[in-house]
Amino acid sequence: MPFVTLPLGATEDRVIGTLDLEQALKGGQRVFKPGLLAAAHRGILYIDEVNLLPDHLVDVLLDAAAMGVNSVQREGLSVTHPARFTLIGTMNLEEGDLRPQLLDRFGLMVEVTAPRDKVLRSEVVRRRIAYEANPSAYAAAWMQQQQTLRHQLITAQQLLAEVTLDDALLDLISHLCCEFEVASLRADIVMHKAARALAALEGRLQVTPEDVRTAAELVLPHRRRRKPFEQPGLDQDQLDDLMQQVLQPPDEAESGAEDSEQKNDQNNSESEDQQQVFAIASAGNVRKITIDTVANRYASGKRSTAQDTPRGLVVRAVPDQNPSSLAVGATLRSAALRGSDDFQVTKNDLHQQVRAGKNANLILFVVDASGSMAAQRRMEAVKGAVLSLLTDAYQQRDEVAVISFRGESAQLLLSPTRSVDLAEQNLRELPTGGRTPLPHALSVALETLEKTAMPPLLVLLSDGKANVALHDGNDPWQESLRFAELLAERGVPALVLDTETGYLRLGKARQLAQALGAECLTLEELSAENLALTVRGCIK
């Protein structure tokens, strides 16, 4: 069985296949050169950090996985070949999630975490050191266990066709998928197959409810998540309750339901006694931001327009004697148009592929958490506004970072990351109180943006009432304006959300927005339905 690795930096031509340049130059014939999808046919296609795979390659995988074939229409070629493979991927959730369409293509999911047992951890280290010291001896020491496992798998493969699953358990599978709000029917099918495979692995011909439960723990966690910021994983208590509801007699099920209700009442009573920071208010629909600028720094995403990118769709070909990405068709056509009897490609025929794509951005949230935000529970509305913008950042595959300021200083709560879940968690736990060190917050923002290679967007949420200077003896407000002007000089697109409320307003946030060269909205305006905001800037 072939085992093919798809690197994150692979080009689309390398994945799906392209014109064989060598054959074309030798005889002027169009010959297809197969790619990685052809190599992985009837085997395994492995992707490390699959959630970082560029979107145009994800589209290719989705097409091939859905149809079981790879269709290539380019460079004068029209080729279709089988491409059925098992997809295996690894990823770090902190770097962002997968697109739902691709996530659903993975039948099973296993969460890998470091063991918490010190005895187990030391044994892992002991074996790792032994392997590094002598890999051959280590493999030989475990050969008998490997052979036993091989024999068990071969036996299970032979037995699988005879394993049966009762209709009652099929109803249980559908019930679990419905209760966990799984949209795709692929979950039901995969759980059915996984439960039968588990039974075969243990040498049984009949699937048990425990097989279904084990399969559910592998099939449902990555499919039940329906929107950003919901915690991944499977509620084990809910899974147990659902299993009991279906498998227990009616009298026992009713008794179990009463116990569960009493437990919920007890938990609710305990939670009411806990002290909490301001909650996140509902912000309604997602607030979309479009950055009206063409960036000269590239990071794969969906928000800003990017030209001459190393990845993305090919939009045209231009003459270039030293191309970094050869446009094969245009090059060969140029050679053919010269009409020479001796077909030959010269340096003057070479063409460069020009690609266009969409950029991701670093969305830097600077959040005022001073005591004034507690008045009229404004912090709830601020958190709701940030949550709405975070949802947009999640959908556009942006990186996010969070700076909060309160008391005497500002703090970078979250360094730039693609995990908007971490940003939401930090936001939810953010306390409120103290003075307003706005100059320090803008200074930290400037330092953070200078370290990033991604096109930025600064989102400041404050009433602008600075009262703590960065340097003793200075005017806090004048310091704030100066840092705002420095950010504007660097061409940083910005958005100011004015959190000031009441009839009498000082308008400090709007003055700060003018210094930043930024758009300025009130929280009421941001809460308007179907708001699509265009932020103009000049990213340098």
Image (cartoon, rainbow, N blue to C red):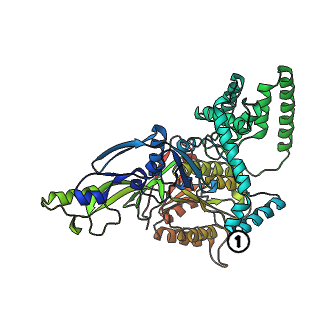
Location of residue 378 in the rendering, given as x and y in whole percent from the top left corner: 67, 51
* Tag 1 secondary structure: helix
Quadrant in the picture for the C terminus? bottom left
Label count reads: 1
Location of residue 537 in the rendering, given as x and y in whole percent from the top left corner: 43, 61
Residue located 54% across and 55% down the image: 52
Residue 418 in sight from this viewpoint: yes
Q: Residue furthest top?
A: 250
Please state which amino acid type lies under the numbered disc 1: Ala
Towards the viewer: 31 or 459: 31
Circle 1 is placed at which residue position? 133
Q: Quadrant of residue 498?
A: bottom right
Residue 139, compared with residue 17, is above or below; it is below
Location of residue 48 in the rendering, given as x and y in whole percent from the top left corner: 57, 56
Residue 271, compared with residue 518, is above or below; it is above
Q: Is residue 4 left or right of residue 380?
A: left
Location of residue 405 in the rendering, given as x and y in whole percent from the top left corner: 67, 64
Towards the viewer: 143 or 93: 143
Residue 120, compared with residue 281, is above or below; it is below
Q: Is residue 417 left or right of residue 213?
A: left
CA neighbours of label 1 inside 10 A, class few (<14), some (14 to 19), many (20+): few
Towards the viewer: 238 or 90: 90
Q: Is residue 298 left or right of residue 267?
A: left
